[in-house]
Image (cartoon, rainbow, N blue to C red):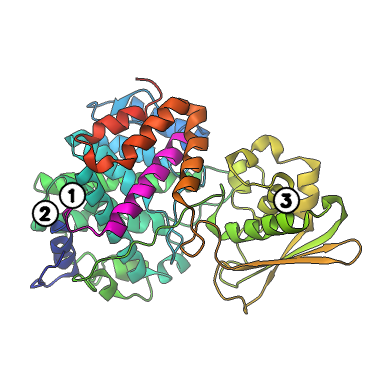
Amino acid sequence: MTHASTHHTIADQVAAHFSSFNYEGLSEASKKAVKRLLLDYIGVAISGSQTESGKVARKFAAITGGHTESTLIGGDVRVPAMQAAFANAISSHSVELDDIDVLALFHFSPPVYSAALATAEQLGASGRELLVALAAGCEMMERLSKAANSSLRNRGYHTTPTTGVFGATIATAYLQKLPVEKIVSALGMAGASASGLMEMYGPSMQKRFNPGPAARNGVTAATMAQLGFTGAATIFEGERGFLAAFTDKNDPTQLTADYDKSYQLDIEFKPYSCARPIHNAIDCALNIRREHSPDLSRIKSIQMARHPDWAHYHLNKRPQTYHEAQVSLPYSVAVALLDGQALFAQYNNARLGEAEILRLTDLVDITVDDSLPRGVSCLMTMVMDDGSKYVSQVDYPKGSIQNSMSDEELRTKFDSLVTPVLGAARAAEIATMVQSIENCANVGELMKLTAKQQ
């Protein structure tokens, strides 16, 4: 996927790079990565579509009307591609089980996969075309995050939607077969609609909303460019462009570096239904539970040392809704110790007032330890009533590149999410089709299987 750069703006170079993508040029590692994520995305979105936030998003998409182009995952209607991308992105972000990247802990699939699948179904694209679009969209999103973070996040912007709209745009533009000059315009419009704030924690559904506009706006930007609307070619490096507006410090070379080399997509997966930086703490709790089988009634204190990067997040000991519980480290440690897992069933409004959960939650104290090696590192010390201590440190949580989930573990996760909604037979049918998606002539056949009724 080489392209000799003779262009002047970053958007020109980016557009030329991604327009040259094709299935044969994708590395086997990239193909495998985006296929693994496709299975994970569909499972998470199907489960998320049945939550309150997913239901509202699907209802909104349905009542707006329009052409029946693309499937609402977990629903029973088809809607315009832009609206399907919007609702499916929200569904896929509604159970806190979507993928993450390594640097900024953003989520590739809600914006990129939602936009690409809706567009692929609309256009009757093949599985091969879909895989290329997904790889291109994910690379675009990760490159921009590398260029903008950690400044973007530190200024209060949410990386998933702010960079995700560009990934959704590139994925859509590829499927629409836009020429380079129209991809440049689409990127300009993506920048004009980039948004998303980190002011999203609390009892509301606010966090679930953020990837919705990013997926929809990506489809909109590419489609507007296809129709002839022109956008700013200087959207990245311009005086009032994306990097200047969203960051104090940035590295624009990340957007155009090493185009002559195969790009490595670092996609991590979530085994637990909560914010990713909490996963290390859950792993600590599960390690101690598995290795020592402590009598929970005899715990005197639980100290959780965290790296300064995340030590001041996720502190809430009294979540009022499951949305808050999913961003509460003390609650997550409590249910992990009690149940031996932290799946969506553990984040349930009915459990928030359980006496034993409240007691264990109150025992968790978070401290700062700048000697820990990684931003998400956790060191848990459990002190028992006889003075004995159990200790566990986790630097790389389950699902990370260094501590990955196997294909079998991902399939188990997928089945656990899809079977309660669509049944075991349909779950197996979807998984089989995803496994050989490169042989699928029309992505619409896959999307039909994700509907609750046919």
Whichever of callouts 2 and 1 sits on the residue coming sooner in the sequence is 1
Labelled disc at residue 182: 2
Q: Residues within 10 Å of mark 2 (few under 14, many from 20)?
A: many
Q: Give the mark toward the camera: 2 or 1.
A: 1
Q: Is residue 405 left or right of residue 279?
A: left
Residue span colored magenta: 22-47
Q: Amino acid at mark 3?
A: Leu
Q: Nearer the viewer, residue 309 or 299?
A: 299
Which of the numbered marks, if any, corresponds to residue 337?
3
Quadrant placement of the N terminus: bottom left
- Let me know if residue 22 appears in the view: yes
Q: Are marks 2 and 1 in contact (CB under 8 Å)?
A: yes
Question: Residue at position x 37%, y 53% from top?
Answer: 108
Amino acid beneath label 2: Lys
Residue drawn at x 31%, y 35% as measured from the top left: 83
Q: Which residue is mark 1?
A: 173
